[in-house]
Image (cartoon, rainbow, N blue to C red):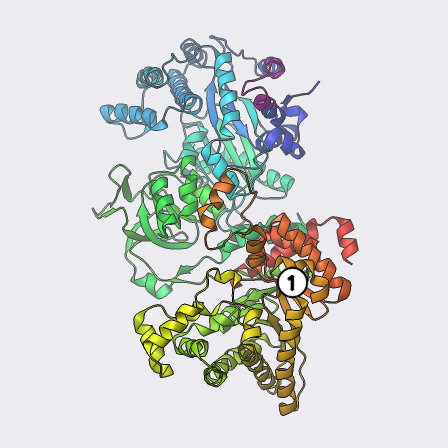
Amino acid sequence: MEKFVYQFAEGSKEMKTLLGGKGANLAEMKNIGLPVPPGFILSTAASNAYNANGKKLPQPVIDEIQIHLSELEKETGKQFGSNENPLLVSVRSGAPVSMPGMMDTILNLGLNDQAVLGLAKLTGDKRSSFDSYRRFIQMFGDVVFHIPAYKFEEALSAIKKKKQYTLDTELTAEDLEQLTETYQNLYIEHSGKEFPQDPYTQLHLSINAVFESWMNPRAVVYRRLHDIDPNLGTAVNIQAMVFGNTGDKSGTGIAFTRNPSTGEKRVFGEFLMNAQGEDVVAGIRTPLDITSLETAMPSVYQELMTICADLETHYKDMQDIEFTIEKEKLYILQTRNGKRTTQAAVKVATSLVYEGLISKEEAILRIEPKQLDQLLHPAFDKAALERGVVLATGLPASPGAASGQIYFDANSAVSQAELGTKVILVRNETSPEDIEGMAKSEAILTAHGGMTSHAAVVARGMGKCCIAGCAEITISEKDKTLTTVSGQTLREGDFISLDGTSGHVYVGQIKLTEAEVSEDFHELMDWVSDVKKLTVRVNADTPSDFETGIHFGAEGIGLCRTEHMFFQDERIRFVRQMIVSENAEERNKALAHLKMMQKEDFIQLFRIAAGRPVTIRLLDPPLHEFLPKEKKELELLAHDMGKSLRDIEKVVHELVETNPMLGHRGARLAVTYPEIYKMQAEAIMESAVSVSSEGISVFPEIMIPLIATAEELMFVKKEIKASVQEIFERERMILPYDIGTMIEIPRACMVADEIAKEAQFFSFGTNDLTQLTFGFSRDDVGKFLPSYMKNGLLKADPFATIDEGVRLLVETAIKKGRKTNPHMKMGVCGEHGGDPASVRIFHEIGLQYVSCSPFRVPIARLAAAQAVLLAPKTLEASAK
């Protein structure tokens, strides 16, 4: 008989898939002797059974719940459903992968109109009893019946205003009893039902709601952003309540065993006196720094510090710990690997290696490759920052720098960002419903909340700049205004700048500069270089791009797109003259100017390369892309060519193609206009000779694009080799060089064995290969691809992560190519070369290098090392 429910004593940290991360860690902590309130776990198998049973709890699950409730009653000495000695429980979600704040929680379950009186009599604390009851009604109404939380908050604010209170803690027992009645009336008004008095009804409805929350919009968005499998499901944790809202010797808080922003080895956290756990995360009250706990309750503080150290050693990673103090007794409610910035992740990983807790290989696996983008976030220019006007200062919750226009709700943030606006999301406090707006924004600013609030934790995980708890501003989300203590008011669309390191908010936009990476980062990347097998090159068309790539560890250029060198103002005129020329004499005259300009570029690239390979792709796009469209530019071209405007317009019209991406481009240009590729080959090799004469090693790789047949490659290659040989004879020098091709047409993959007889290397242009395989236009795919993703017709954007069908074509080309040319170099130069999932695939199928844009080089390097460490041993053995 299948088992659905587990006591904490039956679990361990290795059982996350079955018990969820929260449940597995509660079990682990209980079993190593930490003060964890007792409870039990409905497994992900119960979640699957619930879904299979038409969104209802099956009877076997209900029976197991009853058995475990009885065990919990014995352990606590309390009775579920009792009016005299009630057992109250929390109902919390627990996905196998951490999804902070994305699903639902209900606290104080088991209270009703009679039990609250019994609890007050039992504890002698009427105030905390009614405080717990009103919280339960709000959470239950929000989670189970989707009554907007702000309706309850409005009622709370109204009574505080009437009584002239500032803090929730000023409410008396009588106030809270009155508020509870108000909450029940709100519940009836919005649900059409009386608040349920039967604890078992409360429990079953709450479990159903938590299972349902797996598919709520914010959870779906979060899983999509973090590549979490939607089929995992969630567990549900039922745990005996402990109360942090029982006076000034009680409280609740969150502690990170290291600083989640910097990685510094020091406990970092916050707590609230006389509060329950959700108060800290929600940011409704601004909490105190964890160090204040040492003064308030010294023995509790020391016990917490000891537990933090023990848990970090036990899990061998930075921990995020939730705790509650009930009348000076400490309870640990959760531990998990803490969300952190990439700067902190790198610092923590390298530190743990030197502390002897993990190996270098484990440190490499601890960093998510895509996270490295965060390290490259820009910072404010120092001179511009000194001139900046500080509007307000809040808590530096997540580092980075950003400028943008302010918007006050998630929907506006999303719609504006999709129009290309750089958005700063401004909220009193964020909630899980804001997840998509946060993802689309450059940065987040909140008036309330602390360093462990929802905004702070989620922003750090996303790598977004965030300033939280900015008490110097007042935000009216209704009026869409931000007002400072000095009376300055900003409205929707106004510009501000956020410094997530200092916590300063500035008026207007401030100039940004490139970020500097730490010594820890360089050390980690040295370990990466020792492990990875794939070479990582950079796509670079300019010396600046190449230098950036080398700074980040690039081992050469994998793609230099020569057409990008033609678009500068002083060059485009000669390109246009070359295109509209009516004979070879006119064309060669224009090409002579272009040759000198290209040589300047190539000389700089070869010098920077200092012997590293430089793959130069000859002209690829259709010629019409270079031609002018405005009358003024057409007239200038006519003047330069000594022709009439009408003649030029005629040529331009004739060059327009119905489907230019499938038209007169790439190698087809070399067949019809061989002098173009001849000029480029000469520019490359004359530059190589010049730089070699300076004593610098040079290794050019000439790449011919859009080859479909071996005959095409043979024809174009013959012309190029003849031009190169003339230069060698004239200069009395021979240099090593290769001629290869870009494989980007499905036919080329299928006849790669024939093409390999003529090519010295293959570079897979996976952008075009994907486009031609799917029959998708990259320029138009945005019109329908989101619908494909939403409906599950594609697992991932095929232009972001290599598709299985495209992978099979690449594999076919590799096998066929090596059949006739066993030692051929093969790599990838499309954007997939910087995608971690694709890099792992390229490692598996036997490519030798990937090439990507400069700022993705570290990502590709880390992904390449992880591909080695995660590869099956049999695969590694066969690769050797």
> Is residue 819 visible in this depiction of the protein?
yes
> What is the span of residues highlighted in magenta in the rendered image?
49-66
Reading the image, the residue beneath label 1 is: 827
Kind of residue indicated by mark 1: Gly
Q: Residue at x 31, y 23 (%)?
A: 171
Is residue 52 within the magenta segment?
A: yes
Residue 405 vs 199, above or below: the answer is below
Q: Is residue 36 magenta?
A: no
Vertical arrangement, residue 71 with respect to residue 12, above or below: above
- Residue that lies at the very extreme toward the left in this rendered image: 487
Q: Residue 456, position in %: x, y?
A: 43, 43
- Residue 420: percent from left, percent from top: 37, 52
Nearer to the camera, 449 or 632: 632
Badge 1 density bin: few <14, some 14–19, many ≥20, Cα 10 Å: many
**Whether residue 41 can be seen here:** no
Picture quarter with the N terminus? top right
What residue sits 44% from the left and 52% below the top? Answer: 399
| Residue 341 percent across, percent down from the top left | 50, 49
Front in this rendered view, residue 621 or 47:
621
Total number of numbered labels?
A: 1
| Quarter of the C terminus within the rendering | bottom right
Q: Nearer the viewer, residue 303 or 143?
A: 143
Query: Which element carries disc 1, helix, strand or loop?
Result: strand
Task: Locate residue 860, reporting x and y percent.
Answer: 59, 58
Q: Is residue 664 left or right of residue 155?
A: right
Q: Examine the image and state in which quarter residue 196 appears.
A: top left
Give the vertical position of 607 relative to 10 (above or below): below
